[in-house]
Amino acid sequence: MKKINVGLIGFGNVGSGVVKILRERKTFLKEKIGLEINIAKICDKDIVAKRIVSVDKSLLIREPREIIHDPQIDIIVELMGGIHPAKEYIMEALKNGKNIVTANKALLAQSGKELFATALDRGKSIYFEASVGAGIPLIKSLREGLVANRFKSIFGIVNGTSNFILSQMSHQQCNFAAALKEAKARGFAEKDPTLDIEGIDSSHKLILLTYLCFGRLVSLDDIFIEGISQISLLDVNYARELGFQIKLLAIAKKEGDELDIRVHPTFLPAGHLLASVDGVFNAIYVSSDLAGSLLFYGPGAGQLSAASAVVSDLVDLTQRLKAGLFRPTLNIVMDNSIKKLRRIDEVESRYYIRFMAKDQPGVLAKISGILAKFGISIASVTQKQRHLLEVVPIVMIIHEAKEKNLRSALEMIDRLSVIKQKSVAIRIEEL
């Protein structure tokens, strides 16, 4: 075996980056692994548009099955994205004896159980390093570098678009709409940014991280998801005054015999490493029993960053094929001490709360009285300067409270005639 033939399905931004790396570092990689990684065919709907790398036209095709059924191709790289027909192509490829490299976190989050089972049944592998954190070597580290560890928690800033927006609001003192507009102008946000700003993309990645660390392949319905579209500049600034930063966090943590998994905006202490992660950068903070707490940090998006992760998977697979070794996609061991998933209603946390109330005597007493009815105690309270129409922000930090109790209290408070806007509550994580 002198070379490994690769078929690429999806010649877009990341796909062209993969080809560029393999072309420019062909000799460098061959010297490292003793084999040539050869791009044998490239499939895309558009084989005419210019890319950052030029290829021989004879390599370009429009029909994926010409790659899937080519007996000379050893590995298929799927970078087309989406659920369908990507799922069908990967399933067909596995059944045709192909190993898979993909960056498709949405597909793996939705159909990973079926795809991984098929791969195992066929003696093939699915590698997906680029699906979380782009070029950050996270999945390999969790799967191999920390193989002897039991994990306690994961806290991740795993969506660059949302992190850029929150950073922009903080540094440029602009509102959410202006920050999103800037993200689009710079190419950091899609035309329709819903998956990013509403926490769906982060949830897809959290599903994969939860599987790697806790052996549970949960569904999107199992995760409490709250995005950042309702975050106000007021809250960003009050967070800073109180010694916090707001970040969209993907959280998975084991507490007793329960697994707590959620995605939402979070107040983080300003001194924590995650609080200083700005712009489109990603960071994943992992706590384990043997290695302790570890931070994985780097660009969470970008053509060459993501392409670097794909090439890493290709090299790993190539070395295993060369040695004639098979390793299941994931050597997952389920943590049998986990008996159930914790519902969001049962989560206990400290909270930041902002009320917009009429500036009149007795308001604070009414609010605190209702909180007390639900067993919620106040750690600190600040009544801010008077606004137009005599409506003022009242900002509270409360001690640990159960989510369902807080929500019930806020529903009652929001019905008070002195409350003029829906109350804002943001969870606080101390890590």
Image (spheres, grey):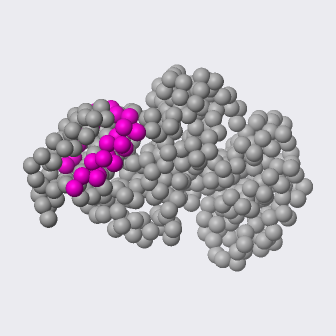
Q: Quadrant of the C terminus?
A: top left
Answer whether residue 199 is visible to the viewer in this image.
yes
Q: Quadrant of the N terminus?
A: top right
Extent of the magenta region: 394-417
Q: Is residue 400 magenta?
A: yes
Query: Where 391 sits versus 400, above or below?
Result: below
Q: Residue furthest bottom?
A: 48
Apparent side of residue 228 relative to residue 34 in the rendered image (left or right) = left
Residue 258 lies, in percent from the top left, at 53, 28
Residue at the image position 47 percent from the left and 67 percent from the top: 187
Task: Report x, y in % for residue 254.
Answer: 51, 29
Left/right placement of residue 412 relative to residue 210 reads: left
Which x, y percent locates residue 42? 76, 65
Query: In percent of the image, x 25 and y 34: which residue is there?
Result: 372
Query: Compared to 325, does 193 lie above or below?
Result: below
- List the single residue furthest toward the right: 71
